[in-house]
Amino acid sequence: MNRALVGRLILKDWYLSRLTLALVAAGGSVSIGVVYVGGSLGFIGLLTSLMTTIFLSILLPTTTIVNERKNHNLAFVMSLPISPMEYTAAKVLGNLSAFLVLWAIIAISVIVTIARAGPFGGVIPLATMAALSPFVTFCLLTAVSIVVESEMWAMITMGASNCAYSFWFLLFRIPGFSENMKSPVPIWSRPVLLILAGQITVIVAALVLTFYLQSRKRDFV
């Protein structure tokens, strides 16, 4: 593997995403501070934190993958002494590393703040599932943008992922879910663990399938 060139492509994507990363970092910092205040403002902070990571999950792949093909820059990148799989590795590693750093800081900070708040431990399972949702969106959008190479399908994936957030109210129809949220300690019920397992499975599958499907392609431009 041409690690030097892969590293340069990763740095290029970080540079192109610098404004997005800076805005998300600023928004995440403010949201965490609002969560720390607690009360009704704390709830607003939770929603804002989720929205911040949702924006991050959408803007990163759009900026570095979709726009690259849309602006006809892919042909130039592939003209470099780099293999298609090295290109794929650069895109996945560059986007994943940038996403993970900010996502982990925001998600962990919010969950730790909730845990230290005292009697709100029952909210932690919901917060964990909510935190993983943008991660799922990011991996699906990254996979589709790289493999399918279609702006239309990237937009469909983005829209479907955003619509999926509106079904979260169904969680409260799960027997005992609402009562568990009132507990002072986290309750990891079977439905919650199944949802978390499903989210992690989708994340891993999307990343693995990206490399697998790319390896079977004959034309990358």
Image: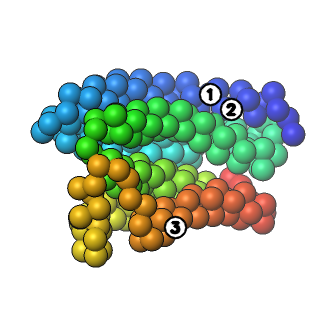
Q: Eyeballing the image, is 117 above or below 192?
A: above
Q: What residue is disc 3 on?
A: 198
Q: Identify the element where label 2 is drawn.
A: helix
Question: So how many labels did they put on this image?
Answer: 3
Q: CA distance from mark 3 to mark 1?
A: 33 Å
Q: CA distance from mark 2 to mark 1?
A: 5 Å
Q: CA distance from mark 2 to mark 3?
A: 32 Å
Three-letter amino acid code of the residue under disc 1: Lys
Q: Position of residue 142 (x, y in %)?
A: 55, 52
The answer to whether 11 appears left or right of 1 in the picture is left
* Residue 187 visible somewhere in the drawing: yes
Q: Residue at x 12, y 39 (%)?
A: 40
Q: Eyeballing the image, is 139 above or below 49?
A: below
Q: What residue is disc 2 on?
A: 9
Q: Neighbour class for label 2 at 10 Å: few (<14), some, many (≥20)?
A: some
> Sequence-wise, which precedes: disc 2 or disc 3?
2
Three-letter amino acid code of the residue under disc 3: Gly
The answer to whether 182 appears left or right of 4 in the picture is left
Q: Are marks 2 and 1 in contact (CB under 8 Å)?
A: yes
Q: Residue at x 54, y 38 (%)?
A: 100
Q: Are marks 2 and 3 in contact (CB under 8 Å)?
A: no
Q: Identify the element where label 1 is drawn.
A: helix
In the picture, the disc for residue 12 is: 1
Towards the viewer: 116 or 207: 116
Q: Position of residue 87 (x, y in %)?
A: 73, 44
